[in-house]
Amino acid sequence: MTLNDLGKMLLGSLAINYILLSIGFTAFDFGHDILYQPHSRWFRLSVATFAAVHYAGMAPCKNGMFRLNVAPPVARHAIGS
């Protein structure tokens, strides 16, 4: 596998990851009440806490996607290889 192939693979992986993240966010946004009902019974969460927990869970996902899929091709381009 060449470096060019690796860069294409990482960008494809980034696209797939962002599509999955977008689907998850859309499901959370439009199905908020449906998702909140069982979770509030199990954990006794307020609506604000429920939303904060879900958004806090999305942050490491986005950070990991950046570090694993975006940073390597950018670093490779920066060093000129």
Image (cartoon, helix red, strand yellow):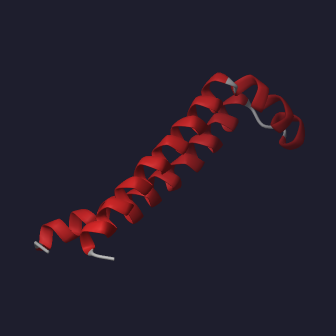
Examine the rendered structure and indicate whether residue 68 appears above or below residue 46.
Answer: below
Picture residue at 22% right of the left edge, 63% below the top: 74
From the top left corner, tell me how far across and down residue 18 is, in percent.
46, 45
Of the pair 70 and 49, the residue shown nearer to us: 70
From the top left corner, tell me how far across and down residue 10 is, in percent.
37, 61
Examine the rendered structure and indicate whether residue 69 appears above or below residue 1.
Answer: above
* Left or right of residue 71: residue 24: right
Give the quarter of the image for residue 72. Answer: bottom left
**The N terminus lies in quadrant:** bottom left
Picture residue at 48% right of the left edge, 49% below the top: 16
* Left or right of residue 43: residue 72: left
Picture residue at 68% right of the left edge, 37% below the top: 49
Picture residue at 76% right of the left edge, 32% below the top: 35
Give the quarter of the image for residue 20. Answer: top right
**The C terminus lies in quadrant:** bottom left
From the top left corner, tell me how far across and down residue 25 is, in percent.
57, 35
- Residue situated furthest left in the rendering: 80
Examine the rendered structure and indicate whether residue 63 appears above or below residue 50.
Answer: below
Examine the rendered structure and indicate whether residue 6 appears above or below residue 66.
Answer: below
From the top left corner, tell me how far across and down residue 7 is, in percent.
30, 64
